[in-house]
């Protein structure tokens, strides 16, 4: 069962890679589509201007040939989405088999934690995509993040299955860790439209240098920003609850609700930064891209809490499983 | 989090009347402090100020690591210490940031509390003259019931409704601001809870070795370290005694712990003597104190018989060194050794001490320095014997777990031998005295605490969460209906009957308002006009035309 789980993770990574390639192909072929889009009005214009000129049949013939790359791009994008869905299923299966093999929730160490957070991220992404199919092109960035994180988990963080240490053996484990995982997954997804917005809003302001040009074919900045906020507003109360649940558990396990353990300190920092984002977002005088930068900063503090604190600091939350 | 929407962005324009300059300065500073920009900056300062608390060792968490840091960085450490870097969360600058932040918060929410309280009791405002300017606007035939019917539909949908003549104003979503204010007020309550805990709370840590002779009672002197809040006196500590009867631990083959349980006998003046179990995630709750199990280890029982034949026992706990196999180090000191029974004279230079390494599971061959498993599969005690003046009478506070190295350096204590002992083995020293390794007792590391702020903290956290949800997901919005007589001149299908003009205004960022507005208008329009009647009327009119 444990080996099956490991294999499923590998297959999931491959499926994410396929999805990423699908989205990338759509991105690349998107050039052709934009050309069609700009070319078409020109032809109409010519037709309208030279009203008397009998309309040549050429545009009618050429339009399906010009359309083909666009259709191909769309197909590639849909393949990307399909592969993401398949990857998500494999990912879920990997988690379930891991949990069955360990006979507990698969959140006992960093490897399992990252695996679950990324799954939540991708599942939430599929939900978002189902509601707003127009955001499909964000999939390129999302699958990139997935490939990076899941591969990191597999290659660097992997540990064999062991039961929980007594300190983790409590029902608060399920309450605290599941909510932390869930909120982290949504924050992880939230950073994708946030970065997308930062690039896209620069692009819409006429910037054409390196990072901005990537946003050429992203959905509109306003929609990205709105999605960023919706995801963060959804995740923040869950994160708050998770931290409170952690405090209640810490009172039972360690005798104090809050003790400025490195993990607690960084959770506090993340909380403060995300609270800053929500305040900045709600303040009209703060520019939206300043606010969004704060959200990205918040995600960096989450990453620091996951990787930095587990690897560099020793504290009571030392369950990473890496020695 | 709309707390924010109405915060003054910048300093308000100076009043026309020339005010007292000091007052103006104060007022401007206050406005600056309570502005959103300042609040955001303070939030970020707070986040940044917390970082050193995770990077540098903190006295409150691991004082021994702070000492190590002093040893490793003799130049840097005192300088860092001067700015409070080893006590970040109690430092002046950290406190200054959060106190300013909370002042700013109070300055912001106090007027908003007042405003919201008023808003809760006030009626929705009158409809604007030109409703077409509102973000949502439509004109439809009015329901036959007129204003009353419109108000009825709105009330059913839990809008706050005010009817003024032929106008209906309605508002909904007060919960957003209520939640917002609840959230921010709860933050203050959280701070108060923490303060209560630190003023009226107390805690103590100690090791407790199993056995009746090692029982301890809850007094300040019996703790290795005790922290009493400024409002707590030693006499306030609840009276009870604890005796460790048994400690069970289970480990995986890898040595990873799987299960702990401590059985103690509790004895207090207020309660009958009883036996109780507790473990890592379920502390022992004793009224005004909770006992937490933090760690465990072994206390080797060593019997020393001096050259006069006097025996003494030591079961001092050996401290674990942090490895998986519970390799432990410790000291067995016998300051009263070699007292001449005939004269009763103490011999200060004939005191005995043994430093040792205890390996619960020693490897098959030397070196015997690292235990391989946490349970006692092959217990070995590696002792070094010292004789001389241990320096215990000098009045200099020293560790009970370590031999005073000054005495060794100055030659007042001399090493007399090294020996590996298994359980039950005896070692005969050069002067004819013997030392015997009898076995081990378990010990546990306990933290005994009382935090009267915990319950207020929990309640304020719950309120905080509820408020947060309200403030994030609540949406304040207004709708206005005005019933106007239809213009008979235009010949529209509705001519002759009255029309209603509807406007909607979302007061917060609310992308879905258009949909809600459409649904609401449809409900008002359809409520008092069943479909059949409507078509019939329309048919009649068509026929008439």
Image: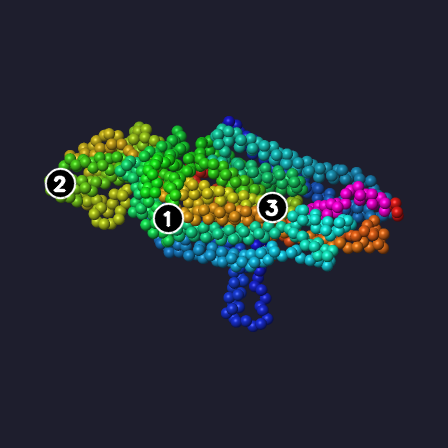
Give the residue furthest to the bottom: B18
Mark 3, other Cα within 10 Å: few <14 / some 14–19 / many ≥20: some
Q: Residue at x 67, y 52 (%)?
A: B161
Where does label 3 land, which residue?
A230
Question: Does the stretch in magenta take in B527?
Answer: yes
- From the image, tell me which residue sits under label 2: B340
Measuring 60% from the left and 55% from the top, which residue is drawn there? B120
Name the front one of labels 1 and 3: 1
Q: Earlier in the sequence, mark 1 or mark 2?
A: 1
Classify residue B7 as left or right of residue A169: right
Could you say where residue B203 lies in the image, as x and y percent from the top left? 36, 46
Question: Relative to B504, does residue B337 appear above or below in the rendering?
Answer: above
Q: How far across and how far down the image is residue A76, in percent?
A: 66, 36
Answer with the quarter of the image where residue B310 lies: top left
User: Mark 1 packing: few (<14 Cα in 10 Å), some, or many (20+)?
Assistant: many
Whether residue B243 is visible, yes or no, is yes
Dot 1 corresponds to which residue? B202
Protein chain holding label 3: A
Q: Nearer the viewer, residue A249 or B143?
A: B143
How far is mark 1 from mark 3, CA to CA? 43 Å
At 63% from the left and 57% from the top, the residue drawn is B122
- Seen at 70% across and 55% down, the residue is B163
Query: In which chain is the residue bearing label 1?
Result: B
What segment is highlighted magenta in the picture?
Answer: B514-541
């Amino acid at each position: 069962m444990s080996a099956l789980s490991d294999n499923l993770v590998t297959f999931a990574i491959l499926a994410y890679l396929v999805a990423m390639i699908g989205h990338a192909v759509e991105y690349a072929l998107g050039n052709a589509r934009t050309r069609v889009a700009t070319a078409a009005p020109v032809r109409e214009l010519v037709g309208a201007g030279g009203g008397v000129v009998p309309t040549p049949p050429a545009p009618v013939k050429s339009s399906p040939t010009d359309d083909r790359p666009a259709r191909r791009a769309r197909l590639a994008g849909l393949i990307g989405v399909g592969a993401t869905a398949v990857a998500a299923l494999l990912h879920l299966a990997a988690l379930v088999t891991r949990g069955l093999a360990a006979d507990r929730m698969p959140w006992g160490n960093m490897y399992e934690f990252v695996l679950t957070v990324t799954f939540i991220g991708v599942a939430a992404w599929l939900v978002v995509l189902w509601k707003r199919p127009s955001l499909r092109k964000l999939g390129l960035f999302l699958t990139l993040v997935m490939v990076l994180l899941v591969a990191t988990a597999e290659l660097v963080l992997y540990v064999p299955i062991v039961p929980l240490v007594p300190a983790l053996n409590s029902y608060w484990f399920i309450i605290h860790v599941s909510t932390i995982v869930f909120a982290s997954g949504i924050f992880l997804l939230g950073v994708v439209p946030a970065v997308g917005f930062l690039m896209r809003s620069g692009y819409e302001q006429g910037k054409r240098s390196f990072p901005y040009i990537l946003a050429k074919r992203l959905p509109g900045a306003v929609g990205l920003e709105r999605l960023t906020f919706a995801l963060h507003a959804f995740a923040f109360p869950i994160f708050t609850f998770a931290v409170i649940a952690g405090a209640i558990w810490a009172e039972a396990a360690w005798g104090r609700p809050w003790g400025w353990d490195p993990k607690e300190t960084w959770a506090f920092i993340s909380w403060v930064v995300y609270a800053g984002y929500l305040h900045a977002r709600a303040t009209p005088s703060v520019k939206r891209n300043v606010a969004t930068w704060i959200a990205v900063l918040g995600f960096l503090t989450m990453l620091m809490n996951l990787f930095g604190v587990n690897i560099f600091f020793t504290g009571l939350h030392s369950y990473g499983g890496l020695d | 989090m709309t707390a924010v929407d109405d915060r003054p962005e910048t300093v308000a324009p100076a009043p026309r009347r020339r005010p007292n300059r000091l007052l103006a300065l104060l007022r401007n500073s206050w406005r600056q402090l309570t502005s959103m920009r300042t609040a955001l900056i303070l939030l970020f300062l707070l986040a940044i100020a917390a970082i050193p608390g995770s990077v540098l060792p903190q006295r409150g968490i691991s004082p021994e690591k702070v000492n190590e840091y002093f040893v490793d960085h003799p130049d840097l450490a005192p300088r860092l210490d001067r700015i409070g870097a080893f006590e970040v969360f109690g430092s002046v600058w950290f406190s200054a940031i959060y106190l300013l932040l909370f002042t700013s918060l109070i300055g912001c929410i106090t007027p908003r509390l007042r405003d919201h309280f008023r808003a809760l009791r006030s009626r929705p405002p009158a409809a604007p003259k030109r409703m077409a300017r509102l973000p949502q606007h439509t004109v439809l035939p009015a329901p036959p019931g007129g204003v009353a019917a419109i108000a009825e539909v709105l009330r059913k949908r839990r809008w706050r409704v005010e009817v003024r003549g032929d106008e209906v104003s309605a508002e909904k979503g007060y919960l957003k601001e209520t939640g917002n204010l609840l959230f921010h007020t709860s933050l203050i309550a959280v701070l108060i809870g923490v303060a209560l805990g630190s003023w009226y709370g107390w805690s103590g840590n100690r090791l407790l070795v199993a056995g009746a002779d090692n029982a301890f009672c809850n007094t300040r002197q019996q703790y290795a370290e005790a922290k009493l809040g400024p409002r707590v006196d030693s006499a306030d500590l609840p009276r009870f005694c604890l005796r460790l009867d048994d400690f069970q631990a289970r480990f995986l083959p890898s040595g990873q712990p799987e299960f702990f349980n401590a059985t103690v006998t509790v004895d207090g003046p207020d309660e009958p003597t009883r036996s109780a179990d507790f473990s890592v995630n379920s502390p022992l709750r004793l009224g005004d104190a909770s006992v937490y199990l933090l760690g465990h280890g072994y206390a080797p029982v060593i019997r020393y018989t001096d050259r006069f034949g006097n025996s003494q026992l030591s079961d001092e706990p050996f401290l674990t060194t942090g490895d998986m196999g519970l390799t432990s180090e410790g000291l067995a000191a016998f300051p009263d050794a070699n007292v001449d029974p005939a004269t009763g004279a103490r011999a200060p230079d004939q005191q005995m001490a043994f430093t040792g390494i205890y390996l619960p599971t020693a490897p098959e061959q030397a070196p015997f320095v690292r235990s391989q498993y946490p349970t006692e599969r092959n217990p070995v005690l590696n002792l070094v014997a010292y004789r001389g003046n241990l320096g215990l009478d000098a009045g200099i506070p020293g560790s009970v777990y370590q031999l005073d190295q000054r005495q060794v350096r100055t030659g007042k204590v001399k090493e007399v031998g090294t020996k590996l002992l298994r359980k039950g083995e005896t070692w005969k020293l050069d002067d004819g005295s013997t030392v015997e390794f009898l076995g081990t007792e378990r010990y546990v590391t306990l933290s005994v605490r009382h935090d009267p702020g915990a319950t207020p903290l929990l309640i304020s956290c719950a309120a905080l969460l509820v408020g947060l949800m309200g403030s994030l997901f609540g949406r304040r919005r207004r709708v206005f209906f005005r019933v106007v007589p239809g213009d008979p001149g235009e010949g529209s299908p509705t001519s002759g009957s009255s029309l209603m003009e509807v406007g909607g205004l979302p007061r917060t960022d609310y992308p879905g308002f258009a949909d809600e507005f459409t649904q609401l208008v449809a409900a008002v329009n359809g409520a008092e006009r069943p479909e059949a009647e409507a078509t019939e009327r329309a048919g009649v009119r068509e026929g008439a035309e």
